[in-house]
Image (cartoon, rainbow, N blue to C red):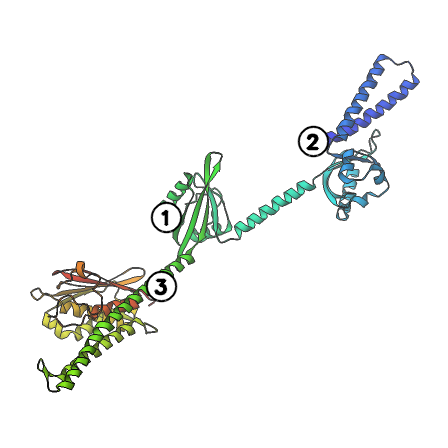
Amino acid sequence: MFFLIFLLVGIIIGLFIYVKYFLQNEKRSKAQPIASFGSISNINELQKAEALFRALIENSHEAITLNDRNGVPIYQSPSLEKMIGWTLEERKLINFTEYIHPDDIDIIKSKIQEAIGNPGKPICGKHRIKHKDGHYILVEGSITNMLHDSNISAMVSNFRDITKQREFEEKIEFDRNNLSSLINNTNDLMWSVDNDLKLITSNNAFDTTVKKMSGNTMSKGAYILASGFSEEQLDRYKMLYKRALGGEVFTEIEYVDLPKDFWSEISFYPLRKGEDIIGTACFSRDVTELKKSVKETLDMVEILQKRNKDLNQFSYIVSHNLRSPIAKILGLSSLHKVDPEQNINGKNILECIEDEVMHLDNVVKDINNIISVRDLGNKQKDYITFETELQLIVQVLENQIKESNAQITRNFNNPKGIVTVKSYMYSIMLNLLSNAIKYRQAEVPLNIHLETNEDDKFVYLSVQDNGRGIDLEINKDKVFGLYKRFHGNEIEGRGIGLNLVKVQAESLGGSIEVESVVNQGTIFKVRIPKLNN
């Protein structure tokens, strides 16, 4: 652009030289009426040159003006009048400060002084000119001091309107800043990599997360999978990038330990240049709270399903286990009215009624126990050792252990104890041990083994015996049901122990599972969540 400016300045200077030379030749032609053929030829050439330079100047989009040493305009190109609306005659009647933006007057004056101090050197700059109709335009150009040249004796200025260009540049800058603000003020991670998995660009959220994961910053051009990932995660992300670089657009849910649980939804979009894929753009959104919300909803659904199952179970108890003794009591009462002395199975009617009332009382107590166990509330939690609880249970079951000649072994080294509700843990171990003794095989020496194991979240207690076992193909869904029995009536029991164990384990936030083979034995595995010690 400045080359064009200098060219136009040269054209103007050349025009003045040629015009002056033409006028001098015109005077000589008047003094010498008889002109030579060569002189006429020179005059024609000068006329052609003048026409050429005038055509260039008057048809140029660059505005050109010449001012004398007092700042009075001498000449202005037609393009200047189109640009600012002022004619040459109008400009001659006003000071130049009248059509310069007030904030730019000092700038213009300093440029003029600089040009005066540097003859022949174009002094470049930008300023605002007031259009005749009142609005301002931004121009860019130069001013050159040619006062020292007797052929020109003027300050030569040339400039162009850059108002629309500046507006366009400002819009681009605004869009760039706005986009940068949007990208860098979001919690979503944004980054892109090339085909070699080297980082192209990233936003602040990505940089912060990388710093948190690896302790280091990641510069542009760095390998994206350099650090902060396990071998399993590295293989996983390599596979995802391979899919994206193959042209696939997709979204995946990924889990990362930061060190807390963190779930992210990552989207991959291939970057293309023509038909070629040159990389992939990636967007990651934190969906941890969403995952937790979904899990809480599913947990609530599971709890409601359990509660509904309990309600159905209690409905069954009410309709059968409560209704049966009540019906018997009513029937016996009717018989007593008819014949108070009547005997039934060697007992009088009042004794039979008493038996049924006791049975009814046991059912009510069982229901009350189950309901009270489910309401964990603010029950105190203590650190207990499995060995201590086992010794207490062995004392309580001393007679049964001696009678069955049971051999009890244990391995409580991992862990030795747990923080939990002491009464629940004691009840769980007591019921599982008493069941193992009760349902032993008469002809096989009874062996009972207790063991504990743990992982990051749970402690696992297993109680294994070599007793009668349970046919799980038939009774799998009934094992932990209330009043469910699997070995006939030859062994005393009400079928409440395993149900109580299940309810207590679930109330603690755990669960119970069973593995069993008929005439080979049973393993009960109780899972209890870890609490702070």
Residue 3's tag is 2
x, y percent for residue 516: 17, 60
The span from disc 1 to disc 2 (Cα, nearest Å) is 58 Å
x, y percent for residue 55: 77, 27
Residue 467's tag is none
Would residue 190 be found to the left or right of residue 341 on screen? Answer: right
Residue 233's tag is 1
The residue type indicated by label 2 comes to Phe
Nearer the observer: mark 3 or 1; the answer is: 3
Q: Residues within 10 Å of mark 3 (few under 14, many from 20)?
A: few
x, y percent for residue 353: 16, 82
Furthest-front residue in this view: 338
Kindly state the secondary structure of the residue where label 1 is placed: helix
Kindly state the secondary structure of the residue where label 3 is placed: helix
The residue type indicated by label 1 comes to Gln
Question: In the rendered view of the protein, which quadrant contains the N terminus?
Answer: top right
Question: In the rendered view of the protein, which quadrant contains the C terminus?
Answer: bottom left
Would residue 201 be found to the left or right of residue 520 on screen? Answer: right
The span from disc 3 to disc 1 (Cα, nearest Å) is 31 Å
Residue drawn at (41%, 38%), measured in percent from left and top?
246
Q: Nearer the viewer, residue 227 or 142?
A: 142
Report which residue position mark 3 lands on.
Answer: 300
Residue 435, quarter of picture: bottom left
The residue type indicated by label 3 comes to Met
x, y percent for residue 453: 25, 61
Q: Nearer the viewer, residue 245 or 118?
A: 245
Q: Is residue 191 above or below residue 123?
A: below
Would residue 456 be found to the left or right of residue 433 on screen? Answer: right
Label located before the other in sequence (3 or 1)? 1
